[in-house]
Amino acid sequence: MNRIVLLGPPACGKGTQCRNIVNLLGLTTLGTGAMLRREVESGSDLGTDLDKYLSAGNYVPDELIMTMVNNWLTAQNGNGWLLDGFPRTLAQAESLEANPTTQPTLAIGLDVPEFELEQRIANRRECASCDSTWTVSPGQSSECPSCGGELRSRSDDALDSFRVRYANYKEHTQPLFDYYAAKGKLLFINGSNSPEDVFASIKKFLTQ
Ligand code: ADP
């Protein structure tokens, strides 16, 4: 049974590796950032509330995100999964540990230095239809390579917002690398390599 969590700073390549791992292992997946942005776009009261956190680059409160993720986990009926962007705080990690059926079997930690992330964020786009994330080069078409939907910049990818998100990541999420290492569950990956090389390292571990 695979229950995998993906950890890493904004724009470290979680979305890309998430797609690769899901294709390799046939897992269902939840990207918490995309789930929250969908709620904002729905225009619901909850979405309006969430937008205050997201547009400033702040994490949403633990209780809120834990309830949303728990509902999703319950609906998986004990099948394997991959979480992209959860847990991001110690309280979130402990909420997964509280139930034997939601304890991760593996945490993949992608490490990328800040200067490289700033460069990547400028070229990042998200598909309006299928929520997948892509890196574009100048002059590239704005069509999603996966579903043909429209690729667009994310409103929280402005540099100011990125810096707040990165500071939150350093303070709250990076300590989870040690948390999972202490449990013997961390696969530490250098995310600076090309997406193909990063996936080759992950695949080698998953299929050994
Ligand atoms: P990135 O990893 O590039 O920051 P995501 O799409 O994973 O992008 O997340 C976007 C935003 O959604 C985060 O900046 C944060 O505000 C919110 N978010 C996503 N997951 C969580 C979480 N587990 N806990 C709190 N906030 C979250």
Image (cartoon, rainbow, N blue to C red):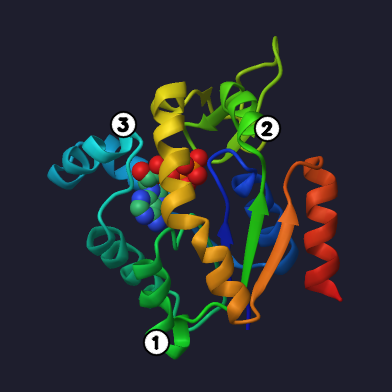
Secondary structure under the numbered disc 3 in the rendered image = helix
Query: Does residue 21 appear to the left or right of 158 in the view shown?
Result: right
In the orientation shown, which residue stands out farthest toward the top? 139
Image quadrant of residue 70? Answer: bottom left
Q: Amino acid at mark 3?
A: Ser
Q: Local crowd at mark 2 within 10 Å, few (<14), some, or many (≥20)? A: few
Q: Local crowd at mark 3 within 10 Å, few (<14), some, or many (≥20)? A: some
Residue 128 percent location from the top left of the image: 46, 31
Q: Amino acid at mark 1?
A: Asn
Asked if residue 178 shows in the view, the reply is yes
Between marks 2 and 3, how big is the CA–CA gap? 27 Å
Task: Name the foreground residue: 146 vs 80.
Answer: 80
**Mark found first going from the N terminus, 2 or 3:** 3
**What is the quadrant of the N terminus in the image?**
bottom right
Between marks 1 and 2, how big is the CA–CA gap? 38 Å
Rendered view: 43 above or below 185: above
Secondary structure under the numbered disc 2 in the rendered image = loop
What residue is shown at x 52% (from left), y 56% (from top)?
Answer: 174
Q: Under 8 Å from ligand 1: the CB of mark 1?
A: no
In the orientation shown, which residue stands out farthest toward the left? 45
**What is the quadrant of the C terminus in the image?**
bottom right
Residue 3 percent location from the top left of the image: 57, 75
Disc 1: which residue: 99
**Mark found first going from the N terminus, 1 or 3:** 3
Query: Does residue 63 appear to the left or right of 167 in the view shown?
Result: left
| Mark identifier at residue 145 | 2
Give the foreground label among 2 and 3: 3
Disc 3: which residue: 55
Residue 60 percent location from the top left of the image: 28, 50
Residue 201 percent location from the top left of the image: 83, 59
